[in-house]
Image: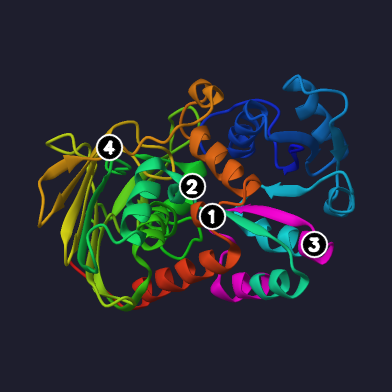
């Protein structure tokens, strides 16, 4: 099978640190060049000169085309899939252009800042028969993929209950980078609710289905923090935090099971367990415990246990067989690579389409709208 020809929008010329402009594009590049099933054929930045600089700095072949406009890369017949890896505020406009050119696309999560915009893009993709993939990397994490397989195969019968207790160390008590201040703003598309909680809950519902009813409670332990520039200097000594650092959600899933999801923020978990996920069914129970981290970024260690009521307890090996090239890429690039591979191989259950992501985005809106704030 010929490799999937990928065009990349938003490739930084050099790595400047996590979450900075162009950095996530570098993570995509690292994933694409490792796979024999993928080929980078084009780069599009704000100008053609910028794209050429990124191509040169990363030592890419001269055959990789440089574009300074979306129309250029969208109309290139030698590009099968275009990945949009830029600031969230630009997603809608850039993705819409690609869809109007009937180009398959990859958009990072969340697809757009609003349900309205994502819904419009989903309808446009559906009407034009365009394939989409959203950067919900947690769906293809090996642990999540195995839990989904076990639940779908009814190893534990009908699911009646599930709870997830998660941890994040993204604590703002000692200061926060000004460049990522949007994470602390509840109304920002990149708030901790949308990004940190959003990625985790997306993985959760990819296994169990979404909520039919939901209640939520928020708390912000740290009301203010110091914003720091790239050199660590204080640029705002009392920045107001409106995004919660403790999130509790509970309700009933569409399949009828009761479910709860908890995410807390502090420096580190006392027992070293970053996530604990229990899925209980009519014929057995699954328990997953993982090291600190996030599914979408790639959790390095974990354990999965299956107990069938009519049999003994067994530990499940959830590490799938993958090509040797996976061993040469670290988190977060490894789950980005898994997403691309799932798309290239047609494994639809391992990645989110824009329709799937719209469902997650609607859930996030409900969680936000229904939230009761603890003092």
Residue for point 17% across, 41% down = 314
Gap between marks 2 and 3 measured at Cα: 24 Å
Quarter of the rendering occupied by the C terminus: bottom left
Residues under numbered marks 1 and 3 in contact, where contact means CB atoms less than 8 Å apart: no
Residue for badge 4: 292
Gap between marks 4 and 2 measured at Cα: 16 Å
- The span shown in magenta is 98-121
Gap between marks 1 and 2 measured at Cα: 9 Å
Residues under numbered marks 4 and 2 in contact, where contact means CB atoms less than 8 Å apart: no
Gap between marks 4 and 1 measured at Cα: 21 Å
Q: Earlier in the sequence, mark 4 or mark 1?
A: 1
Q: Nearer the viewer, mark 4 or mark 2?
A: 2
Residue for badge 3: 97
Q: Position of residue 117 (x, y in %)?
A: 63, 72
Residue for point 34% across, 64% down = 208
Question: The residue tagged with tag 4: helix, strand or loop?
Answer: loop
Q: Is residue 326 above or below residue 273?
A: above
Residue for point 78% across, 48% down = 80
Q: Earlier in the sequence, mark 1 or mark 2?
A: 1
Residue for badge 1: 109
Q: Residues within 10 Å of mark 3 (few under 14, many from 20)?
A: some
Q: Nearer the viewer, mark 1 or mark 2?
A: 2
Question: The residue tagged with tag 1: helix, strand or loop?
Answer: loop
Residue for badge 2: 137
- Of residue 145 and residue 81, the one placed in the foreground of this image is 145
Q: Nearer the viewer, mark 2 or mark 3?
A: 2
Residues under numbered marks 1 and 2 in contact, where contact means CB atoms less than 8 Å apart: yes
- The answer to whether residue 353 is left or right of residue 10 is left
Q: Is 108 covered by the magenta stretch?
A: yes
Q: Residue 274 falls in which quadrant of the image?
A: top left
Q: Residues within 10 Å of mark 4 (few under 14, many from 20)?
A: many
Q: Residues within 10 Å of mark 2 (few under 14, many from 20)?
A: many
């Amino acid at each position: 099978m010929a490799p999937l020809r990928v065009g990349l929008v938003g490739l930084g010329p050099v790595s400047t640190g996590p979450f900075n402009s162009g950095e996530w594009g570098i993570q995509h590049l690292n994933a694409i060049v490792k796979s024999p099933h993928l080929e980078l054929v084009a780069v599009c930045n704000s100008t053609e000169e910028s794209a050429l600089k990124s191509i040169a700095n990363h030592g890419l072949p001269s055959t990789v085309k440089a574009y300074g406009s979306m129309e250029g890369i969208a109309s290139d017949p030698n590009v099968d899939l275009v990945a949009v890896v830029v600031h969230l505020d630009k997603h809608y406009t850039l993705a819409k252009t690609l869809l109007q050119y009937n180009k398959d696309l990859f958009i990072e999560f969340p697809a757009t800042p609003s349900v309205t915009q994502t819904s419009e893009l989903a309808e446009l993709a559906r009407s034009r028969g365009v394939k989409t993939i959203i950067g919900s990397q947690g769906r293809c994490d090996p642990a999540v993929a195995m839990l989904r397989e076990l639940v779908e195969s009814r190893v534990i019968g009908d699911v009646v209950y599930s709870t997830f207790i998660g941890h994040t160390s993204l604590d703002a008590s000692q200061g926060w980078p000004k460049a990522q201040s949007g994470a602390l703003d509840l109304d920002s598309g990149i708030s901790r609710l949308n990004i940190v909680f959003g990625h985790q809950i997306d993985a959760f519902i990819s296994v169990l289905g979404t909520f039919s009813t939901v209640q939520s409670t928020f708390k912000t332990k740290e009301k203010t923090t110091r914003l720091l520039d790239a050199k660590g200097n204080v640029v705002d000594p009392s920045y107001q935090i409106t995004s919660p650092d403790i999130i509790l959600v509970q309700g009933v899933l569409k399949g009828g099971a009761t479910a709860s999801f908890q995410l807390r923020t502090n420096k580190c978990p006392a027992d070293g367990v970053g996530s604990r996920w229990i899925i209980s069914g009519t014929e057995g129970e699954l328990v997953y415990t993982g090291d600190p981290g996030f599914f979408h970024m790639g959790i390095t260690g974990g354990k999965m246990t299956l107990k069938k009521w009519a049999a003994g307890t067994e530990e499940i090996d959830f590490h799938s067989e993958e090509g040797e090239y996976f061993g040469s890429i670290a988190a977060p690039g490894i789950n980005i690579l898994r997403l691309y591979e799932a798309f290239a191989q047609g494994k639809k259950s391992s990645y989110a389409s824009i329709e799937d992501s719209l469902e997650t985005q609607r859930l996030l809106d409900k969680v936000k709208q229904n939230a009761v704030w603890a003092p």
